[in-house]
Image: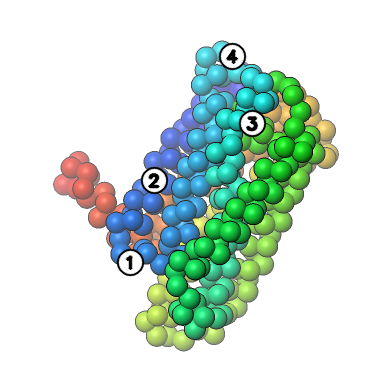
Amino acid sequence: EVIYCLASLYSLLVTLGICTNAMIITATIMSKALHGTCNILIAFCAFSDILHLYGHLPKLFPIFAGQPEMSSLLCCFLQIIPNFGMSSGTILVLLIALDRFIAVRFATFAVRTSVRRHLAAHLLSLLAYAGLQYSFVVIFFTETRVICNPPEAYHGAGKDWWALTSLIVYLSAIAVYIAVWREMRKVGTTSDARRLRRISRAIFSITAVVTCGWLLTMTIVIGNGFLLDLKGRAMYIGNELAGIPVNISLSVNYFVLYFTSSDYRAAFRRNLSVIPIIGR
């Protein structure tokens, strides 16, 4: 059956995503070269992605146990933390873009402002956005039976608003990165400028992968709701298929960083060398 095939695919993506994002967090903690504001935000994003991916477990275990559905109220409670991760991962893409713009356009301000103040401002923005997303869950809640994954916490028009606001955030991130790219062309050739280009190139690559995944997913979700008017099991399958691109993007950030950033590559290799079989 289609549902079991999708559950098997998501099991692989969840396992891969949790492991690779945990490796990003570990590398950030262990490497002094990755203690900048932007690197810390990337680690936060990896942590958010882990929380998001855990939100698939309330779906996977019941499906393989042969009892896939549960009450929507129980599902909403189970998805409180995963949905915070999903909302955080979304807004962090924009916050990282803004951090890069400030670093390039207002370099003096960025240097003078402490990392803690930068992170505090980002945290407040993150909490505000997560609160907005939670409001969609509460306002549009409907008691029904669902196969529980992160988007299933949103009901009716709430799911459309979730998809629409997420789409706006990613489009805004693209606009900011275009501005960053233009500013990068004005940066000189000093060692700091070269380092800024290296980290920006890695972030551009990650953002491209994640944004493409989310844009494709959100476009399909909005299409399912507005154009196809899917209901029940058909809506679930449609949204599960739509979710494949974004869940792939959540699982490959490690590899993107490895191949686009020498700082991350060195940190990953040091961590992998601790493992006896790999380090030989």
Give the residue type that dot 1 points to. Answer: Ala
In the picture, residue 233 is in which quadrant? top right
Q: Secondary structure at mark 2?
A: helix
Measured as percent of width and height from the top left, residue 177 is found at 60, 68
Q: Could you classify mark 1 by the number of other residues whose Cα lies within 10 Å: few (under 14), some (14-19), or many (20 or more)?
A: some
Alpha-carbon neighbours of circle 3 within 10 Å: few (<14), some, or many (≥20)? many
The three-letter amino acid code for the residue at tag 4 is Gln
**65 in relation to 112, above or below:** above
- Asked whether residue 157 appears in the rendered view, the answer is yes
Q: Amino acid at mark 3?
A: Cys
The residue that disc 4 covers is 67
Q: CA distance from mark 1 to mark 2?
A: 18 Å
Q: Is residue 28 above or below residue 74?
A: below
Residue 139 or 7: which is nearer the viewer? 139
Q: Nearer the viewer, mark 3 or mark 1?
A: 3
Residue that mark 2 sits on: 22
Task: Identify the residue at horizontal 55%, vertical 75% (top origin).
Answer: 102
Instruction: Indicate the amino acid at tag 2.
Output: Ala
Disc 3 versus disc 1: distance between alpha carbons? Answer: 39 Å
CA distance separating discs 4 and 1: 48 Å
The label nearer to you, 4 versus 3, is 3
> Residue tagged by mark 1?
33
- The quarter of the displayed image where residue 77 is located: top right
Residue 4: give x, y in percent of width and height.
Answer: 57, 21
Q: Give the distance between the C-alpha atoms of the residues marked 2 and 3, in whole angstroms.
A: 25 Å
Q: Determine which residue is flagged by label 3.
A: 76
Callout 2 touching callout 3 (CB < 8 Å): no
In this rendering, position of residue 196 left or right of residue 123? left
